[in-house]
Amino acid sequence: MSTNVGTIRLRNLAELQISNFEEVAATTKCISEETKTPEKQKKARKVRAATTTKKKIKDEITNAPSIVSSTVVKRNGKKEPLPGQLRIDSFFKSSTKNYKVEHFTTISPGKAKLRRTPRKGCKRLFDEKSTTTESLSKVSDISLEHKLSRKPTRKRTQPQRNAKAKCATSPADVIDLCSDAEPESDNKPAVPSVFEAARPETPAMVNIPSLNLQRNLETEASSNENMPKTRQRKRCPPYKIVEDTTFVVDGFQFGDIPNATHYFLSHYHGDHYVGLTRKFAHPLYMSPITARLVRTFIPIDSQYLHEIAVDQSITLNDIEVTAIDANHCPGAIMLIFKFSTGKCILHTGDFRASFEMESLPIFWNQPNIDLLYLDTTYLSQNYDFCHQSDSIYRVCSLVRQFHEKHASKRILHVCGSYLIGKEKVWLALVEEFRLRVWTEPNRRKAIDCLDWPELKHSLCDDPFEANLHVINMGKISYPQLDQYFKQFEGHYDMLLGIRPSGWEKNSKPSYGKRISVIGVEYSEHSSYKELERFVRFLKPKNVISTVPLGRDLCVTPTVPTNWFKYKGYGGMLSKSYQPSISTFLETPQRKPPTMANRSTNMILSPIENCGITNSENLDDRDIAESAKDDSTEAAHQSVDRFMSDASNDLLSII
DNA sequence: GCGATCAGGT
DNA sequence: CACACCTGATCGC
């Protein structure tokens, strides 16, 4: 292993400023993509989500996973902003909240959602009487809250699953979005299906590389109605396989992918390790934190588990693979694949882009990204998040207000989380209000894997002794908390639920007599603007989304091509890219990225260098903050970064 | 019988 | 909307 991310190769000015005004050979497809409005995208997304669930995947992977890019686009060879280059301070504009009041104490007919009545069209057929307590006891997560909050278990009598209709579905009902290479194939309906007709925008919206993708071994068999049913594997979407490699990223639910030699797990969230079971028997690479989580929860033979520390490289099949912090959940990494030919591919996994990332030396040493696999979770202009430290500040403010208003009351705080993630929010509350934390056994085990002492030390075993409970995000709703609180009413007077999520952007706190819930905008994915800025900064030759729009894993959105493809005079007018440090430093609560304790031959990143020469833009507090950070941020472990982000930001704010 | 998977919930 | 999770039903070893 070698550490190559902490150093910047010195490039001379001419090298940095070389410009290259080649016009992009834009395809008509690109143009049609660019002209799409976000509203249209949203619409299409909805339609697709509704229709693709009906689509049946009949094919399975049989062919080699090697993918050949069909679009090669020329571009300028350097970082440069477009006229509309985003300024970092636009990220921190406090959003005007459009609050809607919801009184939970009196549920009006209009609030039917809260009653959890089955939605129109939902196939939920319950037998009101029968209960299955055995199944309850089987649940491995024997958390107290389960027992406490569980509504009487109801049994679904007639499961109306698509799987059931597998044999009854005729080939004509199947749209195969993944293999457009064979228009006359058996899988293609002779007449466009109703689904296809219902979404004319699909072809332009979807990343469907014209690859001769895997054809299913069992295609013949499954088209034969007399064949015994066999569970069909999902087709592996092309973006799971790193182009021109035998590497698979976060793709475990597709069986053994032919020719795959190495698998990568970007982070330990369920939607990324789905399919990873004890039977897995291939080399698997991940961060040390993720590896500990895997060892804890999935008994995979240890001979297959390999670690890549953040900022370190390994070489596999003559390709240098480097892991960098993804600013997502603990242990989340992005992967850079550097071929001996010079080709370079970045896979972001799930990540939250930030301007700090732009100062990573690897992006300056390796300025040409040929292909970017991008986390497009919030690829819609509606999503414009504040910085996480701002979110944390808001949570603390709201909680403090709540405390002041109910000074005489004993308050149980309940914060939503996933198995891992959102730690910075509840840790801030712990440190600010001296709370003790209880969480479910599984999450507690996960926290033990994080090697994050402050989290560990805040935990206690007895939920009645803890005034902050960290439970699943899905349970931070009025009805569930209402139920949950019944067990603790002898110990506490009020419950304050906290939902830290990107979806809480415009949510309004709802204060009740017993139960109050505050939603706080807190995202561990990139906002639309952060995505745009990141892509414009990297200027990859091509971008592929890794986030499916609906249930069909093969259908992903198209990243706006004008973020990375330059046409006409735009390319000629653009200048050498140089992010302005003054823009960063003028933003409150920000600190320049620190590069302490890197190897000694390191020079300042262009961003920091610029900051020194533009010192008139530094105000005193920023200087003090950055000096403090230099001394305290000794290690560049991701855990430390999380910690310093949360606690330093908080200290500087309060 | 039980682990894996899926659809459908929050 | 659907983050990343849970749940019950079914499949398949």
Image (cartoon, coloured by chain):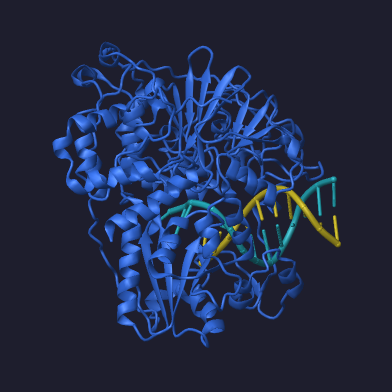
Chain colours: A blue, B yellow, C cyan
Residue A223 placement, left or right of A492: right
* Vertical position of residue A412 compared to residue A596: above or below: below
Residue A75 x/y as whole percent: 33, 17
Front position in the image: A438 or A608: A608
In the displayed structure, would residue A365 be above or below residue A392? Answer: above
* Residue A128 visible in rendering: yes
Quadrant of the image occupied by residue A98: bottom left
- Residue drawn at (70%, 69%), measured in percent from left and top? A157
Q: Position of residue A172 (x, y in %)?
A: 61, 39
Q: Nearer the viewer, residue A243 or A37?
A: A243
Q: Quadrant of the C terminus of chain A?
A: bottom left
Image x and y of residue A423, in percent: 47, 57
x%, y% of residue A373? Answer: 47, 32
Tell me: A565 left or right of A66.
left
Q: Residue at x 58, y 29 (%)?
A: A241
Give residue A213's quadrant in the image.
Answer: top right
A91 over A282 or under it: above or below: below
In front of the other: A235 or A465: A465
